[in-house]
Image (cartoon, helix red, strand yellow):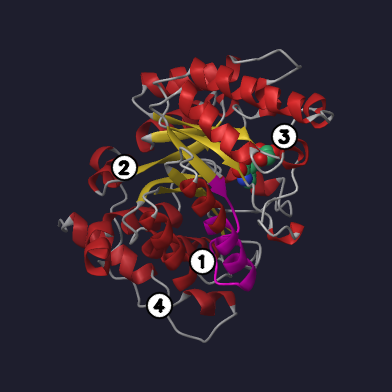
Amino acid sequence: MSFDRRELLRYGLLSAAGAGLTSLLGCGPKVSAPASKLAPVRDISGQWSLRAVAAEHRLLTGFAVDPERLKDHRCASLVKQQASIIVPENAMKWGALRPARGRFRFDQADTLLTFAEENHIRLRGHTLCWHRDLPAWVTAINSADDARNQLVEHIQTVVSRYAGRMHSWDVVNEAVEVKDNRPDGLRNSPWLQTIGPDYIELAFQTARMADPAALLSYNDYGMEDETYDAEQKRSAVLLLLRRLKARNVPIDAVGIQSHICACAQYGAGLQRFMARVREMGLQIFLSEMDVKDREVNRQDPRRDTVVAQTYSQYLNLALAEPAVSAVLFWGVDDGQSWLRYEQGSDEQARPLLFDRLFLPKEAFYAVRAAMEARSEIVRTSL
Ligand code: XIL
């Protein structure tokens, strides 16, 4: 017996959407999800792959990977099968590229670009300017001129090396921190302390000159949920983007990291934020998606279901925004997720689309269904 594919996938989406989520977590009213009658198509290759379904709906999709991870052939073949875009999890950060002042190490980054090009996958660069993963010789810099020269030299050298071959660059990452209490909302980062607030503009201008073809993005976290903190963060990021646009700074996109949580609410705040970003003429990337599932009881066999439903709820909302053009997951399989060793170090974390044996989880099918339903969502939301 055969079922219509769109119908099956849409059913997957409908059965996973919203209703049962809060009750499974024990943090909302008890509402049961409708009983699933039809299972989604289990084939994940070819036309059923994430990259194929995403392409049908004007999206690029893929994962954060590093060359080390690709040595596992199971990981490499999944990436080839599923991804139309990848991003280095760490290989293009200062920590990996800059062993010493005046020196660059490109082996890992080059390996990733070769892998991407050989497999017709786009590469997104991450990240040219961040307050973390800076080598000690950078954090020791204390003169404005030195900091400025180092930032410019770094961006010119790295971006021009790969010019014409990159999909995009995260030029500046996580530059906003409301809790640092500055009127401009900027984080009191090493770059801000040495160069001043203009470091952001300097980074974008330098990147554009070095590669006019790559999309240039500002990337940040904490803008996703319905809390007061997230609303403050969204306002501060919009303020920054408006300042950059008013000064004709070359910026093309905003990365919303999307490290989301199984117990949070997502809704109108994110929708409004994305609409404002679109009105500024910017694209949106959901750039580092995963689901923190610490709150879900370890023994609960429905843990994977809750993660899948969180993906559904978030993507149904976010993909309704036409400016969203890429969705990237922060890792391929649960076994390698950064949530195992950072952000509360949860050894049992199951935040991604594939399990430790590289088998697709419910989350995979939920994500594919949300992408599959996109045209309809975008049409009805316009
Ligand atoms: C994380 C990596 O996943 C870890 O392996 C590394 O130890 C620290 O950085 N936001 C970002 C990413 O922009 O660069 C971070 O990646 C996760 C949070």
Disc with the residue nearer the chain's start (2 vs 4): 4
Question: Is 165 placed above or below 144 here?
Answer: above
Disc 3 versus disc 4: nearer the observer = 3
Q: CA distance from mark 2 to mark 3?
A: 34 Å
Amino acid bearing label 4: Ala
Report the disc number at residue 33.
Answer: 4
Residue 207 lies, in percent from the top left, at 51, 28
Q: Secondary structure at mark 3?
A: loop
Q: In the image shown, does 89 or 145 lie closer to the viewer? A: 145
Corner quadrant of residue 337: top right
Disc with the residue nearer the chain's start (3 vs 1): 3
Which segment did they paint magenta? 219-238
Disc with the residue nearer the chain's start (3 vs 4): 4
- Mark 1 highlights which residue? 306
- For the question of whether residue 335 can be seen, the reply is yes
- Mark 2 highlights which residue? 49
Amino acid bearing label 2: Ser
Residue 65 lies, in percent from the top left, at 53, 33
Magenta run includes residue 225: yes
Report the disc number at residue 133.
Answer: 3
